[in-house]
Amino acid sequence: METELKLSFPDPETLYAVTGEPWFQDAVEIRSAKTEEYENRYLDTKDRILEKSRTSMRIRHVLGQDFIHTVKTTPTAIINGSSSEEGFSGLTSKCEWNVSSDRSEFDVGLFLKAAKNGKDPYEILAAALVPVSGKKLETVCKTAFKRHTITAGYHGSTVEICLDTGSCIASGRSCPICEMEIELISGEVAPVEELGLLIREHADCKPLAISKYARCLMLMRENENG
C-alpha cells in the first residue's frame, strides 16, 4: 500500500526553496538525498481495458538502472482517517506492485509471478491484469521529470519527500509537473499530513489529489474533444 500526500507549486523556484528554509530544516530530520531523471511510459490496450478498471501500468526508466515495472490501483483520498475520492488534503492511499526488470517491455505473466509475494492483495492485482493477459499493450502517454528525493524522519515516521519538475505528455499535448510528494515509508500516517500542513502554512502551494497519470488522461480527453 502506497500512502502519500501531493502538493502543487506555482513554479520550480518556489518548490525548491522549501527544503532550504530554516523552518523546514528545523522540523525535518534529513537522512539522505539524491536527484534522478525519470522517464515513464504508461501502457494500456487499444480499447483501454486498464483505464476502464481504474488501473495504471507503468514502465519507469532511470538512467544507468534497470527498468521498474509498476501497477497501481485508483488512489483514494484520506480525510481525518476516513476515505473519500472527493478529498481536499492531497493525501491518498493506493495498492501498488513494483518489479525490477532488465526488460523494456511489460510481460503480464512474468509480472504476476514476480509480484505474487508482494505486500498488497494479490487477488486485486490478478483481477486487474488477467483481462489484459495476451493482449497487445501500447504506450498511451508519458511523463518525464527530474526528481530530488529526500529521505527524512518526521514525528516518529520515516518519509520520502520528492520534488518533481517536468512534463506530462499525451496525444501531442503536455502540461507541467511542479509538485512535492510526501510518501510514508514507515510509521504512522498522521505525520505525513502534519508535514503537509506545515509546508502549506509557510509556502505558496496547494493540495493535489490527482496523479500524473490522471493528468495525462485529461490531456487525452481534451484532444479527443477537440
Image: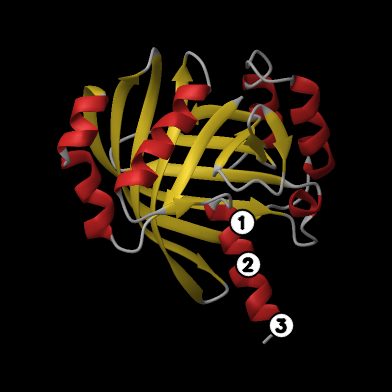
Q: Looking at the image, which is closer to me, 135 or 89?
A: 89
What secondary structure is found at the residue carrying circle 1? Answer: helix
Report whether 163 appears left or right of 129: left
- Determine which residue is flagged by label 2: 218
Q: CA distance from mark 3 to mark 1?
A: 17 Å
Circle 1 residue: 214
Neighbor class of circle 1 (other Cα within 10 Å; few <14, some 14-19, many 20+) is some
Q: Which residue is mark 3?
A: 225
Q: Nearer the viewer, residue 13 or 52?
A: 13
Cβ atoms at labels 1 and 2 below 8 Å apart: yes
Rendered image: mark on residue 60: none
Dot 3 or dot 2: first in sequence order is 2
Q: Amino acid at mark 2?
A: Met
Residue toward you, 219 or 59: 219
Q: With respect to residue 12, does 203 lie above or below?
A: above
Answer with left or right where residue 120 lies relative to residue 62. right
Classify mark 3: residues with Cα within 10 Å, few (<14), some (14-19) or many (20+). Answer: few
